[in-house]
């Protein structure tokens, strides 16, 4: 009986130790080591990059020191996010925006956003692009963008995120090792209680690992591709000067008259369909009124004629005197 319970007890003890160690490993920083559970052999941590002390010279090819080579290696280990903003005055912002997009795509970059505003009488045309270019091609792309027109201003900003990236890498390594150990325990678990506990912890650790991986991927993309906001504008057109002599005044007056005539033509064109509709409705209303008035007048005439026909004439109303009866004295 004791022999049968020994493996289950050992698995339960290993699981408990692993859970306690994993809780510590998930919150470690880049300088910490993954937790080691009792009875387990933790994987060897990744070796840290060999960075010499500030005062120690970097040996190159048989001990020759080179500060430039050390600086190049140090820069290669850094993670820097570079963003920039460039304002350029050009003749045609819309066409120049197309040229800038082609230039960025040829360098291996991409256009994240693009806004174009056509010119109006009160506002000149303009265009704005947000582009992403490979970090190692940033200087070359900026130099080519400067050639598109007259540069008004350039602003570049670099943010060092080396520590943040190293911290994410360390936490991802620790969680990866923890997930691997949980999967090994899941494969050797013999009781339902152990299976449920291991699966629950494995789900939590895997979700944390996926979240950290997405954060690192986003950070790597920001480091590998620099962001540039490019504003393309054009010079504002100066307003026409006021007329200062008779001839210029005459030309200005004629232009105003032509513009007013054109405005009247546009207004008449807009109102013409409404006028036609109003005339049609008015004609229908007038026709109905006339017909109703005529019908009422004819009815009145017919009524008057029937009244005249029913009344006796004066000649018919005066009857002749009756003859005298016999024996009555005559006048």
Image: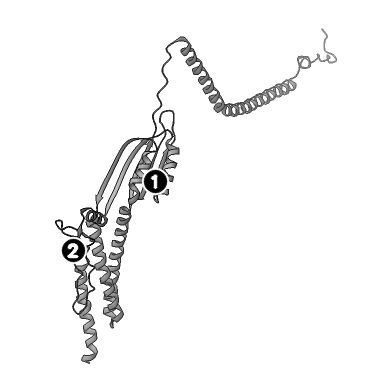
> Quick check: 111 above or below 272?
below
- How busy is the neighbourhood of tag 2: few (under 14 within 10 Å), some, or many (20 plus)? few
Alpha carbon distance from label 2 to label 1: 39 Å
Q: The C terminus is located in which quarter?
A: top right
Which is nearer the N-term, disc 2 or disc 1? 2
Display colour scheme: one colour
Q: Residue at x 29, y 59 (%)?
A: 216
Q: Nearer the viewer, residue 328 or 39?
A: 39
Q: Position of residue 203 (x, y in %)?
A: 30, 70
Residue under numbered circle 2: 31
Q: Which mark is residue 113?
A: 1
> Quick check: 154 above or below 33?
above
Q: Position of residue 313 (x, y in %)?
A: 76, 17
Q: Is residue 174 left or right of residue 111?
A: left
Q: Residue at x 30, y 62 (%)?
A: 213
Q: Residue at x 37, y 46 (%)?
A: 131
Q: Are marks 2 and 1 in contact (CB under 8 Å)?
A: no
What secondary structure is marked by label 1?
strand
Q: Position of residue 266 (x, y in %)?
A: 54, 25
Q: Position of residue 211 (x, y in %)?
A: 30, 62
């Amino acid at each position: 009986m004791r022999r049968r319970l020994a493996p289950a007890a050992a698995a339960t003890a290993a699981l408990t130790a692993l859970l306690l160690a994993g809780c510590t490993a998930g919150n470690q920083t880049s300088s910490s080591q993954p937790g080691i559970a009792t009875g387990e052999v933790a994987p060897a941590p990744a070796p840290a990059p060999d960075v010499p002390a500030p005062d120690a010279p970097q040996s190159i090819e048989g001990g020759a020191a080179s500060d430039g080579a050390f600086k190049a290696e140090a820069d290669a280990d850094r993670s820097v996010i570079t963003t920039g903003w460039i304002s350029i005055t050009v003749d045609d912002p819309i066409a120049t925006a197309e040229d800038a997009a082609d230039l960025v795509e040829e360098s291996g970059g991409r256009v994240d956003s693009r806004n174009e505003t056509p010119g109006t009488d009160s506002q000149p045309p303009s265009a704005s692009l947000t582009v992403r270019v490979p970090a190692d091609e940033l200087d070359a792309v900026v130099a080519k963008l400067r050639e598109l027109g007259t540069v008004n201003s350039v602003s570049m900003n670099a943010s060092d995120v080396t520590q943040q990236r190293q911290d994410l890498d360390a936490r991802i390594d620790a969680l990866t090792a923890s997930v691997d150990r949980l999967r090994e325990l899941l494969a050797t678990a013999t009781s339902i209680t152990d299976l449920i506990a291991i699966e629950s912890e494995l789900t939590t650790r895997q979700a944390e690992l996926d979240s950290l991986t997405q954060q690192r991927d986003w950070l790597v993309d920001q480091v590998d591709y620099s962001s540039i906001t490019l504003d393309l504008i054009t010079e504002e057109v100066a307003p026409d000067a006021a007329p200062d002599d008779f001839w210029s005044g005459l030309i200005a007056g004629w232009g105003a008259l032509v513009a007013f005539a054109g405005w009247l033509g546009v207004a008449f064109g807009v109102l013409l369909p409404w006028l036609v509709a109003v005339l049609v409705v008015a004609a229908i209303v007038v026709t109905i009124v006339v017909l109703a008035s005529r019908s009422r007048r004819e009815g009145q005439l017919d009524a008057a004629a029937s009244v005249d026909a029913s009344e006796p004439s004066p000649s018919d109303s005066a009857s002749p005197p009756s003859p005298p009866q016999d024996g009555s004295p005559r006048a």
